[in-house]
Image: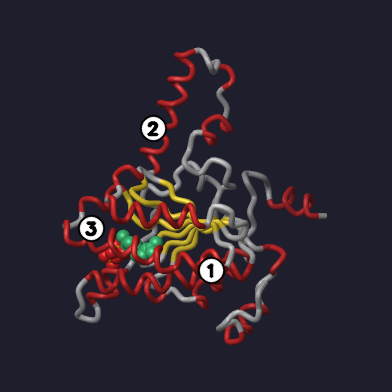
């Protein structure tokens, strides 16, 4: 952990409550509440999205400083294409610009950018910026920051089913060889561990088509904090809460305890 990083000193009381040996390996986040944050201040919804970029930076920094391996952010769902065109345009421009601006820092901090979703639907300008960052950070070995863009969990699963069916029809895969691992290999997230912790800001308590397969055993953490207010302290609170939970994976509490002995 990088305790020398800016702002870490103020977080010391919370860091003292955190067991650094039991951090989640993969944290997924649903960033909700940008619009409400702006509307509460009499601002246009897009002001909330601009402010939300700061929280993206804070969550990335803290994940990286703590040594968390994977942070996966729901930046834009397939359903988000149905928002007013002006808001979609702002979001696409903002995501591309923010990633372009952050690319040197991501490289410096050894953060690898990965993109998942129906990326062919991304507008060219945003795609070019995102892809350039993917290329620039390809060799980085620290935190993997994954952005889910034009992402739908159901669509991802449907695509996987269709690829597997094609492989069976072509004879390169036999029906009896299809396992959970086969399906996982056909998801956008292939090669990544499943999220241990899924955080949703903004007060709603649902997973909204996000990482449907991958989140099967994730601990869910819902907070009323709106995404632009989700700072390092709020993130640490989620991590502390996660560590207070017992992950049973279908076993009894006694079985879990004896496996730790
Ligand atoms: C949900 O808030 C948020 C989004 C749909 C977009 C998230 C995007 C950002 C934080 C911009 C920057 C992203 C990156 C990766 C640089 P909402 O608009 O649904 O809020 P509401 O529920 O209050 O209406």
Q: Which of the two discs, 2 and 3, sits closer to the camera?
A: 3
**Count of all numbered marks drawn on residues in the image:** 3
User: What is the distance, in whole Å, between disc 2 and disc 3 at their CAs?
Assistant: 25 Å
Mark 1 lies on a secondary structure that is helix
Ligand number 1: quarter of image: bottom left
197, 137: nearer the viewer = 137
Which residue is rendered at x = 66% and y = 72% of the image?
A: 18
User: Is disc 2 in contact with disc 3, using a CB cutoff of under 8 Å?
Assistant: no
Which label sits on residue 158? 2
- The numbered mark, 2 or 3, whose residue comes first in the sequence reads 3
Quarter of the rendering occupied by the N terminus: bottom right
58, 234: nearer the viewer = 58
User: Is disc 2 in contact with disc 1, using a CB cutoff of under 8 Å?
Assistant: no
Which residue is rendered at x = 32% and y = 68% of the image?
A: 33
Task: Name the residue tied to disc 1.
Answer: 238
Q: Which of the two discs, 3 and 1, sits closer to the camera?
A: 3
Task: Name the residue tied to disc 3.
Answer: 88
Label 3: few (<14), some (14–19) or many (≥20) C-alpha neighbours in 10 Å? some
Across and down, in percent, residue 52 comes to 36, 71
User: Is disc 3 in contact with disc 1, using a CB cutoff of under 8 Å?
Assistant: no
| Residue 162 placement: quadrant | top left
Mark 2 lies on a secondary structure that is helix
User: What is the distance, in whole Å, between disc 2 and disc 1 at their CAs?
Assistant: 32 Å
User: What is the distance, in whole Å, between disc 3 and disc 1 at their CAs?
Assistant: 30 Å
Quarter of the rendering occupied by the C terminus: bottom right
Label 1: few (<14), some (14–19) or many (≥20) C-alpha neighbours in 10 Å? some
Which residue is rendered at x = 53% and y = 36% of the image?
A: 184
Mark 3 lies on a secondary structure that is helix
Which residue is rendered at x = 74% and y = 48% of the image?
A: 255
171 w.r.t. 12: above or below: above
Across and down, in percent, residue 107 comes to 54, 64
């Amino acid at each position: 952990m990088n305790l020398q990083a800016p702002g870490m000193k103020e977080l010391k009381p919370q860091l003292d409550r955190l067991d650094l040996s039991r951090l989640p390996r993969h944290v997924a986040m649903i960033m909700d509440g940008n619009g409400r944050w702006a509307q509460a201040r009499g601002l246009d919804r897009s002001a909330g999205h601009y402010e939300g970029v700061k929280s993206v930076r804070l969550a990335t920094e803290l994940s990286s400083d703590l040594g968390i391996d994977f942070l996966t952010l729901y930046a834009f769902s397939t359903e988000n294409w149905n928002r007013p065109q002006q808001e979609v345009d702002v979001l696409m421009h903002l995501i591309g610009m923010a990633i372009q601006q952050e690319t040197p820092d991501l490289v410096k901090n050894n953060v690898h950018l990965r993109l998942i979703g129906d990326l062919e639907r991304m507008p060219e300008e945003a795609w070019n910026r995102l892809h350039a960052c993917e290329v620039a950070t390809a060799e980085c070995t620290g935190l993997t920051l994954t952005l889910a863009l034009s992402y739908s969990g159901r669509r991802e699963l449907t695509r996987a089913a269709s690829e597997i069916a094609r492989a069976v029809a072509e004879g390169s895969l036999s029906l009896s060889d299809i396992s959970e691992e086969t399906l996982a290999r056909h998801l956008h997230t292939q090669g990544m561990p499943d999220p241990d912790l899924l955080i949703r800001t903004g007060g709603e308590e649902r997973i909204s088509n996000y990482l449907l397969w991958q989140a099967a055993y994730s601990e869910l953490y819902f907070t009323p904090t709106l995404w632009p207010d989700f700072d390092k302290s709020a993130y640490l609170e989620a991590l502390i809460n996660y560590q207070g939970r017992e992950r049973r994976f279908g076993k009894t509490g006694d079985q879990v305890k004896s496996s730790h002995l």
